[in-house]
Image (cartoon, helix red, strand yellow):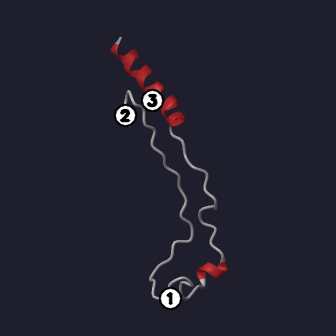
Amino acid sequence: MKKIIVNSIICLLTFIFPLLLLSQKLPIKPGKISMEELTMEFCPIDSNARAMIICDYGKSYFTYSDEEGF
């Protein structure tokens, strides 16, 4: 009986948990770096910068309810 319950829980976690994970669609394809970006000698915005972020993307939000809070 315990084995059936454990197997049922594992199946639920295996098949339902990935559905709960939502990812954001990236505006660029990872790994696609242009030759211009590779050969860049300095950052055009700040010539003293040691690194430059090519793409920074993300969304976040908070839902507040008077009854439950955050």
Up-down: is 41 above or below 9? below
Q: Quadrant of residue 28?
A: bottom right
Q: Nearer the viewer, residue 34 or 10?
A: 34
Q: Amino acid at mark 1?
A: Ser
Name the residue carrying label 1. 47
Depth order, front residue of 53/60:
60
Q: In terms of secondary structure, where does tag 3 sit?
A: helix
Which residue bears the numbered disc 3? 13
User: Alpha-carbon neighbours of circle 1 within 10 Å: few (<14), some, or many (≥20)?
Assistant: few
Horizontal side of residue 6 vs 56, given as left or right: left
Mark 2 highlights which residue? 69
Q: What whole-number distance in Å separates the C-alpha atoms at marks 1 and 2?
A: 46 Å
The mark closer to the camera, 3 or 1, is 1
Q: Secondary structure at mark 2?
A: loop
Tell me the crowding category of disc 2: few under 14, some 14 to 19, or many 20 or more residues within 10 angstroms, Cα based: few
**Tag 2: amino acid:** Gly
Mark 1 vs mark 2: give the one in front: 2
Q: Amino acid at mark 3?
A: Leu
Q: Nearer the viewer, residue 18 or 10?
A: 18
Residue at 52% of width from left, 30% of height from top?
Answer: 15
